[in-house]
Amino acid sequence: MIQRKELIKRYIEFFKSKKHKEIPNSSLIPNLGGSDTGVLFTTAGMHPLVPYLLGQKHPHGKRLCGVQKCIRTIDIEEVGDSTHHTFFEMLGNWSLGDYFKKEAIEYSFEFLTKVLKIKKDKISVTCFKGDKDAKKDEESAKFWISQGIPKERIKFLSKSDNWWGPAGETGPCGPDTEMFVNSIEIWNDVFMEYNKNSNGKFEPLKQKNVDTGMGVERTLATLNNLDDNYLTEVWKPIIEEIEKISKQNYENLSTKPKMRIIADHIKASVFILAEGITPSNTEQGYVLRRLIRRAVRFGRELRIKNFASKIAEPVFRIYDDYPELKKNKKFIMEELKKEENKFELTIERGMNKFKKFSENKKLSGEEAFLLFQSYGFPIEITRELAKENQVKLDEKEFQKELEKHKELSRTASKGKFKSGLADNSEQTTKLHTAAHLLLAAIQKVLKDKDIMQKGSNITPERLRLDFSFPRKLTEEEIKKIEDLVNEQIKKSTNVTREEMSPKEAKKKGASGIFNEKYGDKVSVYTIGDFSKEICTGPHVKNTREIGKFKITKEESSSSGVRRIRASLG
């Protein structure tokens, strides 16, 4: 059997032989280093590369490869079948304005047939069939035929199947070609050759990129002739632990989906906790809480309790190559136990309340909110229960109740923000540069150089910056911070970018998180003698471009973290 580490090693070594540089695995939280990609979690291997796909020079050059840990929350309810996962690893190789379709397809074919030893007659592919926005991708099909894939094993499909992007309303996008082994998709080559502009038009890009993705879990199952991802080595030890605790068999059709859900959610929770996120009612913390509590709910159906930390144990063995897991193991285990115990105290009473409320097959928004507020039921759990029991749920009324109490950000339940730096617009660029000035001003006014950015979200309309600080800011402090930022803007200071090692950046006093998540080179942006920060852009060239800066709100984000919202006048 081909194991996880062996597959990853073969992939990286193959692309290194093709002059690609390996890039480090980035944080699951996308704003590491000051860049905000507009979503709560890193969802794909290309996610940390957005600025470079948009034209910024990458410190490692134009050919990159790596494996990226990812979290996707848009289809949590789908978890339970044989292929859906919340946490997964994605292998990828990228060309930033270097090679294009011909070489990408040749590399893919060579890796599949020569390195993985997959027989040519087992491989089929799909290409984009064309529409009013972009032409049919005959070019990719031609290159596949040249590799020996016959025409009858090449299908042309529409945008819904063979097109990627853009990440937001505008930006790089293009056709893709998907590879199937025995009718199971394992790899996708995306050809970013268009830019969708604000008028909805698709224009050819000057820098044409290749972005690829090969899911480790699905590929392992395919290579080992398994029709269930959960039978591979990255899942089986977790499933076996659930079997041991529950004294039930995975192969039982009624228990199988429940065991998959518990295994998936606990694994994803371990990785989110390793980032320092704790369960809460907002943003990443809300997703984490939802995962743990959903696992507890299905654990109840298997008649098991106090299981989360036990089931987490195999995750540390499977992924012993992630230092953040070992380093944060105590914290991870404690938080799992704490959140499970918290929900266990209320779940029984909450389930009884749900039954009582829904006797007439209707559940009001007010009742759903009570389940959320008093019994800790995320709305997604209530929605699932309502669907399982054919109960009509008034979610509109629930949202109104939610707004009134301001307990939960709607963006968190969707798993993403409305917008972010991924749009690369002029206003977003201005606000992003202003965020650098804001962090430096906070450190100076509060006389604390150790204050760190804990998160950010920047749209064309406003910026939001979270930072480590234990108390509410005074009106005087807020005014001083705002004035100091505007003072720097008026100075018309040039914004400069340098590439250096993380060690050198630290020595020069740059703000950032100095750990294993950086590679051997980083981009450091300097604004006069006021701000120096590791970041992945984009930025204005001179502070005078920013305009008038205004702080609109200062509030608590979570324990020990404050939040400032600001806009440009």
Image (cartoon, helix red, strand yellow):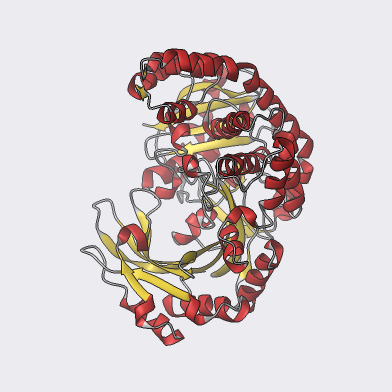
Seen in the picture, residue 349 relative to 484 is either above or below; the reply is above
Camera-side residue: 157 or 36?
157
Residue 29 at what x, y percent from top left?
58, 43
Q: Position of residue 271 (x, y in %)?
A: 65, 43
Q: Can residue 59 be seen here?
A: no
Q: Is residue 147 left or right of residue 563?
A: left
Q: How far from the left and from the top, in percent, is residue 210? A: 46, 68
Q: Residue 279 lies in what quarter of the image?
A: top right
In the image, 223 versus 160, the foreground residue is: 223
How many labels, in total? 0
* Residue at the image point whose x is 43% and y is 49% from the top: 422
Kindly indicate the quadrant of the structure image that contains residue 193: bottom left
Identify the residue shown where x is 40% and y is 14%. 366
Residue closest to the eye, 533 or 556: 556
Residue at 61 percent across and 74 percent down: it is 15
User: Taking the image as drawn, is residue 77 in sight?
Assistant: yes
Q: Position of residue 211 (x, y in %)?
A: 48, 65
Give the quadrant of the N terminus. bottom right
Task: Classify the position of the C terminus by image quarter.
Answer: top left
Between 416 and 243, which is closer to the camera in this rendering? 243
Outermost residue toward the left in this view:
132
Asked if 483 appears above or below 397 in the picture, the reply is: below
On screen, residue 526 versus residue 335, left or right, reads left
